[in-house]
Structures are given as structure tokens and as C-alpha cells.
Amino acid sequence: MPFPDLRPEEVEQGEAVDPQHPSATDATTWASFVFAGATTPSGTISSGNVGTERSADGSDGADFGTTWVRHRVPIADARAAGLELDKNGAQLTHSPVDKELPNLDFMDQADVLEKYYPHCCKLVQEMTGASEVYAFDHN
């Protein structure tokens, strides 16, 4: 579910991807995910019609203007794709969070902001060569 406060009755049931879909194999793993529905306005510029109310500490509250639809989709192993950052805009890499931040609590917002954000910024900086990197909005 995209938000912890999203109730099951707020999620429509979408159509499952056909098991004979070209991306499906005998080893395919299937999972249900919730996506914004077709009636949810899209675009890169905010219209003010879709959004999330925020609490004073920056946590998500109720969302508005969005329909949610659950779809059963095939899950692929991205490690097999050989993605490259410059070529594909994404790349898998190893980042030993468990060794570098052994007591990190992802459920503690202060922990995420004070420990994980700098860890992520450092990783992105190393991967891209960027002079400055800022992490924000992990919701």
C-alpha cells in the first residue's frame, strides 16, 4: 500500500498481467502493487488537484485527488539487466548500510534524516561525481 492509512476500500482491483505475457517465465515472481489509477491527473507541473497533506514534522497525512488500483504484475530480477547509470538512468550497486550503520532504524524519522540521508548522498556523489548531493522526501 502506498500509505499506511490507505484503507482497502480505497483501492480498486485492477486487471492482472496475463501469465503468458512476454516478460513472464516459469521462474517469474508475481506480486500485487498499488498504483495511481487512470483517473488520477498526471503531469510534471502541480495542478493542486493531487497531493498529500503534510504534518508539521513533514510526515504524510491524507492524500487527495488520487484513485488507487491494485495490479498483479511480474517482478524481474534487475541484477540480470546489467543497468548502467549513464545509459539507463539507474544502476544497482552495493551499499553496506548494515555494516556502516548497524543500528539504523528506518522507522525512526530522525535516524533516517541524520544517518541514512548522508549515507545516500555520499553514495550518489561517488556514483555520479556530483559536487553536491541533497537527499529529501523519503516518503
Image (cartoon, rainbow, N blue to C red):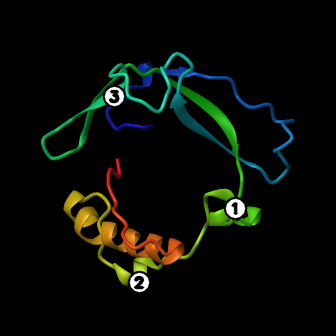
User: Which labelled disc corresponds to residue 10?
Assistant: none
Front position among marks 2 and 1: 1
Determine which residue is flagged by label 2: 99
**Which amino acid does the dot numbered 3 rest on?**
Gly
Numbered label tally: 3
In the displayed structure, 99 sits above or below 74; it is below
Identify the secondary structure beneath mark 2: helix
Front position among marks 1 and 3: 1
Q: Residue at x 55, y 76 (%)?
A: 94
User: Which labelled disc corresponds to residue 51?
Assistant: 3
Question: In which image quadrant can residue 56 be found?
Answer: top left
Q: Within 10 angstroms of label 3, few (less than 14), some, or many (20 or more) residues? A: some
Q: Residue at x 62, y 57 (%)?
A: 89
Residue 13 percent location from the top left of the image: 58, 21
Question: In which image quadrant can residue 58 be found?
Answer: top left
Q: Earlier in the sequence, mark 2 or mark 1?
A: 1
**Which amino acid does the dot numbered 1 rest on?**
Lys
**Which amino acid does the dot numbered 2 rest on?**
Lys
Q: Which residue is drawn at 58% across and 73% down?
A: 93
Left or right of residue 82: residue 54: left
Q: Within 10 angstroms of label 1, few (less than 14), some, or many (20 or more) residues? A: few
Left or right of residue 10: residue 18: right
Q: Which residue is drawn at 50% across and 25% down?
A: 42
Residue 31 percent location from the top left of the image: 63, 42
Pointer 1 with pointer 3, Cβ within 8 A: no
In the displayed structure, 92 sits above or below 63; it is below
Q: Which of marks 2 and 3 is nearer the N terminus?
A: 3
Left or right of residue 17: residue 20: right
Determine which residue is flagged by label 1: 87
